[in-house]
Every structure is written in structure tokens, then in C-alpha cells.
Image (spheres, rainbow, N blue to C red):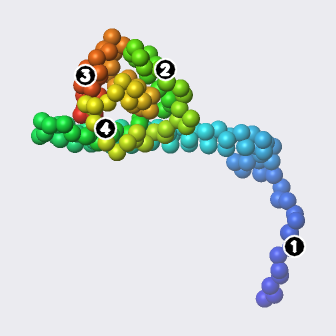
């Protein structure tokens, strides 16, 4: 028996098979592939941002629980663990809507803090000035439960304490 080598097929394109999933006429345009990849990258970034917010919310639930237990067991003045930022953006509009007499309007933050960051390791609500309260609102992009007609700093301290100790 003599073995015959197969014919040299290097460089030969096999005939088109109309049943093949990618027949020659169906090869996508390279520009369309790039556009699809860029769209997928954008969608991945949105998903990652969503996951970061979910993670920060979960952390905040634990932080609020620890703060609540601390508040319940201690009648004295105390610093509470700061929650993580969960709302994207600069809260300048919210903060400036809650201005009180004698406090200058806030300017935009030079760098918007990322979701999952904290303004400090701890926050001591009683002792915050109106300016410090507005800084919190701007950083977290949340009104912290403070209403525009609540101008007494003691009421605002209570709202901040409520925010720090509740999973809301």
C-alpha cells in the first residue's frame, strides 16, 4: 500500500458553504464591530457603577445598624461612622437650597467624590455648623432629611443623626 500525501491546499480558499453560520456575504463591517464593542464597554461601565452603588448601600445598612446600636447604648455625645456616598454627582443644588442666613452659597466641588467614598471616617452630628452640614449635603448629594423650613441647627443635627442610624 502506498500513501499519497494530500494535495497542497495552502492559500486556497474553500468554496463558500451557504449553510455555514458566517457565509462570506454575512461578514460584519469592521466599523460596526468597533461600534458594538464601544457600546458594550459603555454598558459595562453602567453596570459597574450600579454594582458600586449596590455595594455602598449594603455597607451603609451595616454602618447604620452599628451607629444605631452605639446611639442606643450611649447617652453621651459620640461620633458615628460615616456612611458611604451612594448618589452620583455633586449636591450643590440641594445644599444651596437649604442655605440659612449668614451662610454663603457653596461652589461646585473641584472633583466630584466617587460612589463608595466617605467624607470622613466619623461624623459627630451635634457640633456641626450650618456650613459643615451643607458640606455633608453637597458631598453625599442627599438632603439628609432636612427640609428648607428647618433652619435651627439642632433640628438639622437630629436629621443627620437619623440618617446615620437608619438604613434609608
Q: How far apart are the two marked residues, 3 and 4, measured between alpha carbons?
A: 15 Å
Q: Secondary structure at mark 2?
A: loop
Of residues 166 and 28, the one nearer the viewer is: 166
Question: Which label is found at residue 105?
Answer: 2
Image-quadrant location for residue 78: top left
Q: Which residue is mark 4?
A: 123
Q: How far apart are the two marked residues, 1 and 4, measured between alpha carbons?
A: 77 Å
Q: Residue at x 50, y 43 (%)?
A: 48
Can you see residue 137?
Answer: no
- First in sequence, mark 4 or 2: give its number: 2
Question: Which label is found at residue 44?
Answer: none
- First in sequence, mark 1 or 2: give its number: 1
Q: Callout 4: 10 Å neighbours few (<14), some, many (20+)?
A: some
Q: Is residue 168 above or below residue 81?
A: above
Q: Relative to residue 11, is residue 60 drawn left or right?
A: left
Q: Residue at x 53, y 35 (%)?
A: 112
Q: Which residue is mark 1?
A: 8
Q: Callout 2: 10 Å neighbours few (<14), some, many (20+)?
A: some
Q: Nearer the viewer, mark 1 or mark 4?
A: 4
Residue 106 in percent (x, y) is at 49, 24
Q: How far apart are the two marked residues, 3 and 2, measured between alpha carbons?
A: 21 Å
Residue 8 in percent (x, y) is at 87, 73
Residue 97 in percent (x, y) is at 44, 16
Q: Callout 3: 10 Å neighbours few (<14), some, many (20+)?
A: some
Of residues 168 and 129, the one nearer the viewer is: 129
Q: Which residue is mark 3?
A: 154
Amino acid at each position: 500500500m502506498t500513501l499519497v500525501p494530500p494535495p497542497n491546499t495552502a492559500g486556497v480558499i474553500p468554496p463558500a458553504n451557504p449553510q455555514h453560520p458566517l457565509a462570506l456575504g454575512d461578514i460584519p463591517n469592521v466599523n460596526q464591530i468597533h461600534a458594538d464593542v464601544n457600546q458594550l464597554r459603555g454598558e459595562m461601565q453602567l453596570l459597574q457603577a450600579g454594582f458600586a452603588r449596590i455595594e455602598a448601600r449594603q455597607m451603609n445598612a451595616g454602618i447604620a445598624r452599628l451607629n444605631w446600636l452605639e446611639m442606643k447604648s450611649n447617652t453621651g455625645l459620640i461620633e458615628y461612622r460615616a456612611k458611604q456616598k451612594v448618589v452620583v454627582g455633586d449636591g450643590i443644588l440641594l445644599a444651596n437650597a437649604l442655605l440659612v442666613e449668614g451662610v454663603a452659597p457653596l461652589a461646585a466641588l473641584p472633583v466630584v467624590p466617587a460612589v463608595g467614598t466617605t467624607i470622613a471616617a466619623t461624623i459627630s452630628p451635634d457640633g456641626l455648623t450650618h456650613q459643615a452640614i451643607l458640606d455633608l449635603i453637597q458631598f453625599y448629594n442627599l438632603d439628609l432629611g432636612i427640609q428648607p423650613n428647618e433652619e435651627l441647627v439642632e433640628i438639622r443635627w437630629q436629621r443627620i443623626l437619623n440618617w446615620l442610624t437608619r438604613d434609608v
